[in-house]
Image: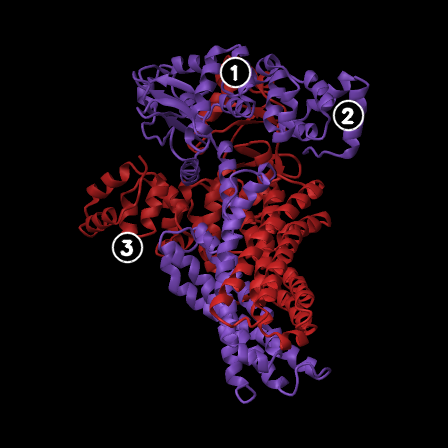
Chain colours: A purple, B red
Amino acid sequence: MQFELTSDFLLKLREAISARNGAFVVEQFKELYPPDIAEIFNELEIEEAKYVYKQLDEQIAADVLVELDDDVREEFLASLTSKEIAEQFIDNMDSDDAADVIAELPDDVQDEVLSHMEDSEQASDIVELLNYNENTAGGLMATELIRVHVNSNAIECVREIREQADNVETIYAIYVVDDDEKLVGLLPLKKLIVSSTRSKVAEIYDPKIISVKTNTDAEEVANVMDKYNLVVLPVVDALGRLVGRITIDDIVDVRREEETEDVQRMAGMEALDEPYMNMSIWGILKKRAGWLVILFLGETLTATAMGFFENEIAKVVILSLFVPLIISSGGNTGSQASTLVIRALALGEITIRNWLTIIKREIKVGFILGLILGLIGFLRVVVWSQFTSIYGPHWMEIGLTVGTSLIGVVLWGNIIGSLFPLILKRFGFDPAVSSAPFVATLVDITGLIIYFSVASLLLGSVL
Amino acid sequence: MQFELTSDFLLKLREAISARNGAFVVEQFKELYPPDIAEIFNELEIEEAKYVYKQLDEQIAADVLVELDDDVREEFLASLTSKEIAEQFIDNMDSDDAADVIAELPDDVQDEVLSHMEDSEQASDIVELLNYNENTAGGLMATELIRVHVNSNAIECVREIREQADNVETIYAIYVVDDDEKLVGLLPLKKLIVSSTRSKVAEIYDPKIISVKTNTDAEEVANVMDKYNLVVLPVVDALGRLVGRITIDDIVDVRREEETEDVQRMAGMEALDEPYMNMSIWGILKKRAGWLVILFLGETLTATAMGFFENEIAKVVILSLFVPLIISSGGNTGSQASTLVIRALALGEITIRNWLTIIKREIKVGFILGLILGLIGFLRVVVWSQFTSIYGPHWMEIGLTVGTSLIGVVLWGNIIGSLFPLILKRFGFDPAVSSAPFVATLVDITGLIIYFSVASLLLGSVL
């Protein structure tokens, strides 16, 4: 039922294009939707794509353009004149998509395209949309919507819808405004259909309506739509006048960016502001170097910690061999714990009030994980010692030191990993900053102290 | 404009409840939406919540129940009789929400609730929905929808909508079916409104329609809705008959689960199947221990690697102090790189075909990051040596060893971190498995070899 792009299909299409077989092309694309066609276009050469575009219905061609990968669209538009862009594409787009596409063009081309648009009202709408910050409701909204006056009646609503029908692709709701263009409520399409044609809007509309301001942050817009299960959300200006609407597909990208930021923070770096491939090397360096240096400076304390045990290491060099194993086990366990807690906090599955429950269970989990790794570590030393003399005469003490330290370090890593995001949250910081590398650094220092203290205890006679 | 729950509000509400001041409660809740009320309920005691419920409109009370936290809902429902649950709540819910709520009840209560429902057709719909796997389209869909026969006309459509209006909260589209109840197309509400009342459905409906089968995987459903920007998606059975519809709010949870799985895999563990708080300690252990043991076994190779340099360490014990610093720097850099690449792959910003571009830029980035950390490491040793004698007479050689190794280890960590997810993807594995701990383990082993090799070279005369 669904379209899947095969190399076979692509081959046949390319043959048809080079043979200028328009009928075949039209036939192939008839059953497809714009996102499918965009998928195909991303694979074609510019000249091929241009030929196919000419065979498509103008509305569909415009929808396809919106769905293209950024770099393909850029290349494609660069091959067209401003007049072609305006008349064949922008004129057929919703204002929010049109503004996004125009914003990607070079400054001088932007003005040219706008001047070539047929619908000057649409052009001035777009100019206004271009002024909004892209991370606000104003930057997300489209201006196409159905508005009726609160004093009008059902018949006038239907007439208004008929007039606007060409501009508004899908009608989600009818907005009700007063004399000052202020948003006063909502008339669900269902209500309009089931009401008598003589009904007054004032009698059937719903005055309870959720809206956002043009300067509302995009993340806040997404939260509101999520919380109230909204498919469309009206946008008002500072005076409460209806200026646009945001549909749910527009906030998919907002959510995706947020998730990306979280994931990047959790990897011990600042979140990128742009897609990975669009970032310059210096841009990426700026986002990464800061945290790396902080983690590095923290980690230099491990050298200090180990310095205290220099004499012990000098006497039993073998102890140093297990340092990476011990500290990485604590770090890995801590990174698991912090990720579980950060994610559960983000999803609202837990709150900081649950901290005691969380710590109690993570102490149990950490202890058992420590037992498992400790046992494997102990066995590794003991079994090896039967075949080599690398661990010397005190292999049993060394095995016990490794095993016992692992229990302590893993348990400790688990406690720090689960507690730290809660502490950050408690003091108003983003828990995602309690990244795996951050927790690992904390655990490395304390892990070394645990390890060498256990060694001093168990290997006391030797040291 | 938006509701925010304050402790002041909660205090006043509780006072009103204990004074049995119903009028105050009704007044407070009049302007609120079900998700707001649910937020308040999550904070109330059961008896308080029960009192408030009685003051609410039945439809709103049912909507609030759906929005409650799982544990609060469970506790609340346990305090009601089956008859109350059926008549006050389930009868007022959409079939998909009703099925979800009933599925959470104990088995014997489920049957009782179903038998108490007023609308027996709705009850049998729910029984059917309960049979579907919750991770399929059948498990996500609701059965309330507007369907018209392809041979009917516009007037009959409006009549059908009026009849169904009570059952269907929001009408997104009208589905067109044939004699066999097979889905043949879609009639947008806009089209119905702008068409003459004498129009035949056959003349105005759109036969191009995207649908999924009841057994389509939930993740696939989410992908289809995303790709085609759909707000609602019809579901058909194996014979192509229309059986339900999925709305976009139902797939928000599907997406969130997917993201959670990814994040958890990236932290070096298996994805949890359930919310963190619902997992037993043993359940969590099972998800975490496997990967921890694998990472641990991999990390034991660090002891082997260091074993080769035992003599060098014995001669210059000071070398061992920098082991944690060196390997963690490689690990941190690698974890940043792998996260960037994994996320960019997930978002479709890059594909494996871009591998050469990615490696080239990550070599540059890694080299510069290495230079920065290497310089800091070198200075740390040199500056410290002016104040203490801890680094002995060869502090300059040791400083150079640490600095040079850092450049190599950081560069290497960056290459491994960015390359490994691409390799996993190339061979059909989930790139998220190339987690930060996994990359760190790989880098630890090679990092040690780089460090001690550099040491052998620069400290050759001393060793």
**SS for tag 1?**
helix
Q: Which residue is mark 3?
A: B47
Q: Position of residue B77 (x, y in %)?
A: 38, 53
Looking at numbered disc 1 in the image, what kind of residue is underneath it?
A: Asp
Residue at (35% x, 46% y) in the render: B38
Please give the chain letter of the residue carrying mark 3.
B
- Position of the C terminus of chain B, as image quadrant, is bottom right
Residue B30 is situated, as x and y percent measured from the top left of the image, at: 27, 37
Q: Is residue B226 above or below residue B377?
A: above
Residue drawn where x is 52% and y is 16% of the image: A111
Q: Chain of mark 2?
A: A
State the image coordinates of residue A250 (x, y, percent, origin top left). 50, 32
**Three-letter code, disc 3:** Glu
- Residue located farthest toward the bottom when viewing the structure as drawn: A461
Q: Which mark is residue A111?
A: 1
Count of marks placed on residues: 3
Q: Which of the two labelled residues, at mark 2 and mark 1, occupies the earlier sequence position?
A: 2
Callouts 1 and 3 on one subunit: no
Q: Amino acid at mark 2?
A: Leu
Which element is circle 2 on?
helix
Q: Is residue B283 visible?
A: no
